Image: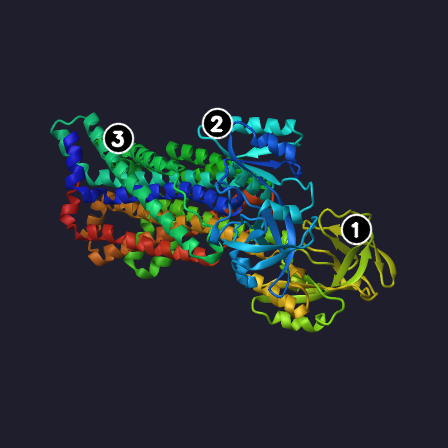
């Protein structure tokens, strides 16, 4: 039987193309999902973790305190440490580009630990040298050899440095809004306060050192030297903890990607099982002949399983290669976009091994039932109408009971997990409820298809027969619809979840960064401009969506700074310029930045003191403000106003920097006076776009897998109905009418499965997004109607195309030959 199996694979290889394609795409889906996780971590490491991507260990303080020199000395002298970098950083100002600029200055790291990449020139080596990022240099007209006068809070008020090199622009969203400067220790000593300490430590360990032991040992030495709660992490752990910090301490990304992998395995197994059923059904006579020639049941079963093993392994290899090619193309496209240059491809060994093992294993497991059927007297007897599950027989009652129990129990878990932001519970509930729907599908899908079949009545006899076929053999109809139902539900779930998650991300960014750019106006001076006249000029700048002028209307006294200025703006101006749609200032309330004291606020205005209610916002990126009608007094004399600017959603990071310069020129102020979160927003959105891009790339794979399942199940249906179709031909049905009947039946089944799958996908996608992001954002269902309409159209057209080959096979068979089929 070994020779028989191998001869089948070599002589009749065309029979295995369909199943090989299904396995290949399934493995491609699974391996791509795992590559998405690795590439996402690599991309985050190239953006958020850019500064410490070359380090084995990173040390930071849990409470944000700087490390002392004693703690640094204790850490770097640990036996496991080969090289180290103790980071010092401060913010400085400097004159360039016609105005005062703002930048972050840090000391240079050893070459092995330096996160910045040199674009041209050289890293600073002499006492009065510094390197600056190429984006800022281009924006300000600086080059290698230019000089800057840095001003900070150190003993030297004006430190003159020469630019020795240009660095590639940072992708870190926390640093991208300011100029990036790297200098020698002597420059830091000049412009930084003495005793400011070190903001963090990076370590490269000696070869062969155990990372876990080194973490514990270094942390213990630092604590003994006076460091308070030092946190030692690997570079990847640091990236993960940073992402978790941005998502309320929850690392949901890994869980979501594992969920994708689980869904991929479920879909793949069902589709491959259907495909193998077609293959075995096509060989019914051949296997029966082998039985007559003396082959035992075990030999027949072993032959089929060997075929599955070989086909599964070869297809898995092709699937892994295809996944690598797909991810390479997606990442290459992402890197070609200036705002997504940090996208990084990572192909972990787990993606290759898991793809090969899972693909081969799921093919063998999926072939178990068809292999058993190959030894039965009637391989397709299970699909005969007499054995259909219905509420009138025991099989149907058991199936209905189990299905309803799984549906109800799963729904409860899904809703509970979504409300309580418990993704693990929601995943279990979603899977259980969907299995329940599949178990009950035989009992309701045929009825729905029959109702939809009334739309085919104008097609005459083929349309009526297609509608009747849906109810006459419920198991056949349900089996045909199941593959596409799974695929469309999966695709709709991903699309709805991605759209909903993107909206939630945007809402969270809007809450934290409600104003794109803000600038204080000048009070007096020859270069200052009238702010009221400058507003129309700012509105006319390319990339500006809205601009408003806020007048200073009062101050709130405090014990630290002596007073906080409160600005006034109208409700209409707030609606035009604020990103946060939920932030709608009303009269009688002062809106304060995060961490402000709660309770009534007393304002000192031009007309006296006024006490108003206050509301503390969840952002530090806005000053105190109120709605203009809250006060009747005018602006405070001698106090500068403020301009808020909202930018277009499509504006790039380079354009934001140019706008800062143009807005400063319009207001007659230094460029450093124009600040805001626009660049952070652009960078964060770029990261989100990359994450969603690689996930969206998997949607096409899921659609193709589902459509192959539809085509294979339709083929099995036509094989089972050979005598039935021949009888219709004998009774006068033409070949054209037979093709039309099968085409209409396929379109009806595909259309119903697509509509039901889209509806379930919307619900699952929304609840899944709620379970994932409910703790950090307000999740509002966002349905991508155009994308779902495209999925519906593709499903219907694909169902029609899937019927072509089976219909052609049925039409070419003569009625006499068909009626003689056993």
Number of marks in the image? 3
Judge depth for marks 2 and 3 and give the one in front: 2
Say which of 310 and 460 sits in front.
310
813 relative position to 32: left or right: left
Residue 194 drawn above or below residue 515: above
808 relative position to 472: left or right: left
Crowd around label 1: few <14 · some 14–19 · many ≥20 (10 Å)? few
Q: Can residue 581 be seen in this snapshot?
A: no
In space, the residues marked 2 and 3 are separated at their CA atoms by 51 Å
Q: Earlier in the sequence, mark 2 or mark 1?
A: 2
Task: Name the residue carrying label 3.
Answer: 372
Q: Secondary structure at mark 2?
A: loop
In space, the residues marked 3 and 1 are separated at their CA atoms by 82 Å
| Place of residue 87 in the rendered image (x, y in percent of width and height, measured from the top left) | 59, 41
In space, the residues marked 2 and 1 are separated at their CA atoms by 49 Å
| Place of residue 418 in the rendered image (x, y in percent of width and height, measured from the top left) | 56, 41
In the picture, the quarter occupied by the N terminus is top left
| Place of residue 504 in the rendered image (x, y in percent of width and height, measured from the top left) | 57, 50
Judge depth for marks 3 and 1 and give the one in front: 1
The residue at the point 31 percent across, 60 percent down is 459
Q: Can residue 219 be seen in this snapshot?
A: yes
Task: Name the residue carrying label 2.
Answer: 210
The residue at the point 48 percent across, 54 percent down is 121
Crowd around label 3: few <14 · some 14–19 · many ≥20 (10 Å)? some
Task: Name the residue carrying label 1.
Answer: 561
Q: Secondary structure at mark 3?
A: helix
């Amino acid at each position: 039987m070994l020779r028989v199996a191998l001869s089948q694979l070599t002589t009749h290889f065309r029979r295995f193309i369909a199943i090989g394609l299904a396995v290949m795409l399934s493995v491609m889906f699974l391996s791509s999902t795992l590559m998405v996780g690795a590439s996402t971590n690599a991309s985050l490491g190239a953006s958020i973790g850019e500064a410490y991507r070359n380090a084995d260990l990173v040390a930071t303080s849990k409470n944000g305190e700087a490390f002392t020199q004693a703690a640094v000395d204790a850490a770097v002298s640990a036996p496991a440490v080969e090289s180290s970098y103790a980071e010092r950083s401060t913010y400085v100002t400097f004159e360039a580009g016609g105005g005062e600029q703002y930048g972050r200055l840090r000391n240079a790291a050893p070459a092995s630990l330096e996160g910045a990449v040199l674009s041209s020139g050289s890293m600073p080596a002499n006492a009065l040298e510094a390197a600056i990022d190429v984006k800022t240099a281009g924006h300000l007209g600086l080059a290698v050899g230019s000089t800057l006068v840095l001003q900070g809070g150190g003993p030297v008020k004006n430190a003159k440095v020469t630019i020795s090199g240009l660095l590639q622009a940072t992708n870190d969203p926390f640093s991208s809004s300011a100029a990036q400067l790297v200098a020698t220790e002597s420059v830091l000593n000049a412009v930084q306060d003495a005793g400011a300490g070190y903001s963090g430590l990076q370590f490269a360990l000696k070869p062969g050192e155990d990372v876990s032991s080194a973490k514990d040992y270094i942390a213990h030495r630092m604590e003994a030297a006076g460091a308070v709660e030092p946190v030692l992490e690997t570079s990847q752990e640091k990236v993960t903890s940073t992402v978790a910090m941005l998502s309320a301490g929850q690392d949901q990304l890994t869980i979501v990607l594992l969920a994708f992998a689980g869904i991929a395995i479920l879909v793949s197994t069902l589709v491959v099982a259907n495909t193998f059923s077609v293959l075995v059904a096509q060989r019914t006579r051949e296997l029966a002949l082998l039985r007559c020639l003396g082959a035992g049941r075990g030999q027949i079963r072993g032959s089929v399983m060997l075929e599955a093993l070989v086909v599964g392994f070869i297809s898995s290899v092709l699937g892994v290669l295809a996944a690598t090619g797909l991810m390479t193309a997606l990442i290459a496209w992402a890197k070609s976009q200036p705002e997504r240059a940090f996208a990084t491809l990572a192909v972990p060994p787990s993606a290759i091994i898991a793809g090969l093992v899972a693909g081969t294993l799921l093919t063998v497991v999926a072939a178990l039932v068809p292999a058993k059927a190959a030894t039965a007297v009637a391989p397709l007897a299970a699909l005969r109408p007499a054995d259909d599950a219905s509420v009138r027989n025991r099989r149907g009652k058991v199936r209905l009971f189990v299905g309803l129990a799984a549906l109800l129990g799963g729904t409860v878990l899904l809703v509970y997990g979504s409300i309580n932001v418990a993704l693990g519970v929601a995943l279990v509930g979603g899977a259980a409820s969907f299995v329940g729907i599949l178990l009950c599908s035989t009992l309701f899908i045929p009825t729905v298809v029959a109702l939809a079949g009334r739309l085919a009545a104008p097609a005459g006899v083929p349309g009526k027969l297609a509608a009747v076929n849906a109810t006459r053999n419920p198991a056949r109809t349900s089996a045909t619809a199941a593959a596409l139902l799974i695929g469309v539900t999966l695709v709709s779930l991903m699309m709805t979840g991605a759209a909903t998650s993107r909206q939630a991300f945007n809402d969270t960014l809007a809450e934290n960064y409600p104003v794109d750019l803000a600038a204080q106006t000048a009070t007096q001076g020859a270069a200052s401009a009238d702010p009221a006249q400058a507003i129309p000029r700012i509105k006319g700048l390319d990339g500006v969506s809205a601009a408003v002028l806020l007048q200073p209307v009062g101050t709130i006294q405090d014990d630290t700074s002596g007073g906080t200025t409160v600005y006034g703006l109208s409700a209409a101006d707030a609606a035009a310029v604020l990103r946060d749609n939920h932030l709608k200032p009303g009269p009688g309330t002062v809106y304060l930045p995060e961490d402000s004291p709660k309770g009534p606020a007393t304002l000192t205005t031009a007309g006296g003191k006024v006490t108003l209610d206050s509301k503390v916002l969840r952002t530090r990126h806005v000053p105190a403000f109120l709605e203009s009608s809250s006060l009747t007094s005018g602006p405070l004399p001698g106090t500068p106003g403020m301009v808020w600017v909202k930018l277009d959603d499509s504006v790039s990071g380079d354009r934001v920097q140019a706008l800062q310069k143009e807005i400063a020129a319009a207001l007659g102020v230094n460029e450093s006076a124009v600040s805001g979160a626009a660049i952070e927003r652009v960078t964060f959105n770029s990261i989100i776009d990359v994450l969603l891009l690689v996930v969206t790339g998997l949607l096409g794979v899921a659609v193709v897998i589902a459509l192959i399942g539809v085509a294979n199940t339709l083929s099995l249906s036509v094989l089972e109905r050979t005598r039935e179709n021949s009888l219709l031909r004998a009774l006068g049905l033409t070949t054209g009418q037979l093709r039309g009947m099968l085409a209409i039946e396929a379109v009806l089944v595909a259309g119903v499965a697509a509509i039901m799958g889209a509806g379930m996908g919307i619900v699952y996608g929304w609840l899944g997004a709620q379970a994932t992001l409910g703790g950090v954002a307000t999740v509002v269902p966002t349905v991508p109607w155009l994308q779902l309409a495209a999925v519906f159209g593709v499903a219907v057209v694909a169902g029609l195309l899937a019927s072509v080959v089976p219909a052609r096979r049925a039409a070419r068979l003569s009625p006499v030959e068909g009626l003689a089929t056993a």
